Image (cartoon, rainbow, N blue to C red):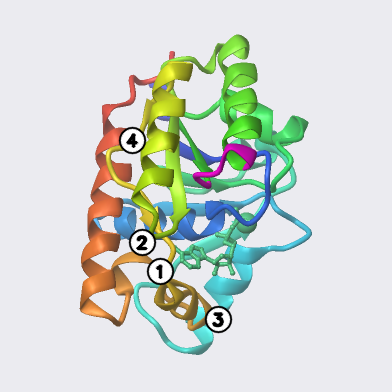
């Protein structure tokens, strides 16, 4: 009998809260569902349950597709009862505690959303270095998130990440009120009601997806 295939797993981790982990996790989950993947959106932030609540909100509003968003306490539990999924998006809590670190170590790709300020970049880069030391090197991808309108700030952030030697996702996630109200209404990513925001979200979805597909399978 062949061993069951481990589902491809993309994790979102950060040191800080409010950087867009849950927003991007939901965006990628929706993208994976539209690509025909049996997707599990695994919510490890048991205090906030952002993804679980959002999944329930979608159901109440009869939004399609249905998203399988469930809460998990540990990775072991997830590996045991993930059912018949073939793609997992892991949303973690801020602070990158032991659980987040463990999830990062056991994922095919680890996205680290971060703001563009040095205050945001410093802890994110420290977390990236810590994860790299623990063997996640080559699977760590920084994502500039909730980016404001200042091009010089953005440029400095890109430079800082390059100088630190970490990979940066080709797309960034701009700060827009519309994204927030879409999330509050049970939508994410490509479901944006504003066509301009939809286009931005679709580009982000494609960038996250293709980077995840590029990940080398774990042995
Ligand atoms: N691109 C964006 N523009 C504006 N608001 C955003 C954007 N992405 C996320 N948000 C909002 O910012 C807040 C924090 O985002 P969230 O994804 O929950 O962060 P985290 O999971 O890292 O704590 C939420 O209220 C969310 O709706
Ligand atoms: Mg969150």
Q: Which residue is mark 3?
A: 57
Vertical arrangement, residue 162 with respect to residue 12, above or below = above
Lower position in the chain sequence, tag 1 or tag 4: 1
Where disc 4 sits, the SS reads helix
Q: Which residue is mark 4?
A: 212
Q: CA distance from mark 1 to mark 4?
A: 19 Å
> Could you classify mark 1 by the number of other residues whose Cα lies within 10 Å: few (under 14), some (14-19), or many (20 or more)?
many
Part of the protein shown in magenta: 115-119
Q: Which residue is mark 2?
A: 30
Q: Report ligand 2 position as a quadrant.
A: bottom right
Residue 1 in view (yes/no): no
- Whether the residue carrying mark 3 lies under 8 Å from ligand 1 is answered with no
Lower position in the chain sequence, tag 4 or tag 2: 2
Q: Which residue is mark 1?
A: 188
- Whether the residue carrying mark 2 lies under 8 Å from ligand 1 is answered with no
Vertical arrangement, residue 97 with respect to residue 188, above or below = above
By secondary structure, the bulk of the magenta-drawn segment is best described as: loop
- Label 1 with label 2: CB-CB less than 8 Å: yes
- Label 2 with label 3: CB-CB less than 8 Å: no
Q: Quadrant of residue 196?
A: bottom left
Q: CA distance from mark 1 to mark 3?
A: 12 Å
Lower position in the chain sequence, tag 4 or tag 3: 3
> Could you classify mark 4 by the number of other residues whose Cα lies within 10 Å: few (under 14), some (14-19), or many (20 or more)?
many
Q: Quadrant of residue 100?
A: top right
Quadrant showing the N terminus: top left
Where disc 2 sits, the SS reads helix
């Amino acid at each position: 009998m062949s061993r069951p295939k481990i589902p491809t797993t993309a994790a979102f981790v950060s040191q800080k809260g409010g950087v867009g982990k849950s927003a991007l996790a939901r965006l990628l989950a929706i993208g994976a569902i539209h690509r025909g993947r049996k997707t599990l959106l695994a919510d490890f932030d048991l205090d906030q349950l952002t993804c679980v609540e959002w999944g329930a909100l979608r159901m109440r509003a009869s939004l399609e597709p249905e998203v399988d968003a469930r809460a998990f306490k540990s990775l072991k539990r997830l590996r045991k009862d993930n059912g018949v999924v073939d793609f997992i998006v892991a949303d973690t809590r801020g602070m990158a505690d032991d659980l987040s670190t463990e999830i990062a170590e056991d994922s095919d790709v680890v996205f680290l959303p971060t703001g563009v300020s040095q205050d945001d970049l410093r802890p994110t880069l420290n977390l990236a270095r810590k994860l790299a030391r623990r063997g996640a090197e080559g699977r760590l991808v920084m994502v500039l998130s909730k980016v404001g309108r200042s091009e010089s700030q953005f440029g400095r952030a890109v430079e800082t990440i390059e100088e630190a030697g970490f990979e940066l996702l080709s797309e960034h996630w701009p700060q827009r009120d519309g994204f927030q109200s879409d999330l509050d209404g049970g939508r994410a990513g490509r479901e944006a009601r504003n066509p301009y925001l939809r286009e931005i979200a679709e580009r982000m979805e494609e960038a996250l997806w293709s980077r995840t597909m590029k990940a080398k399978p774990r042995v």
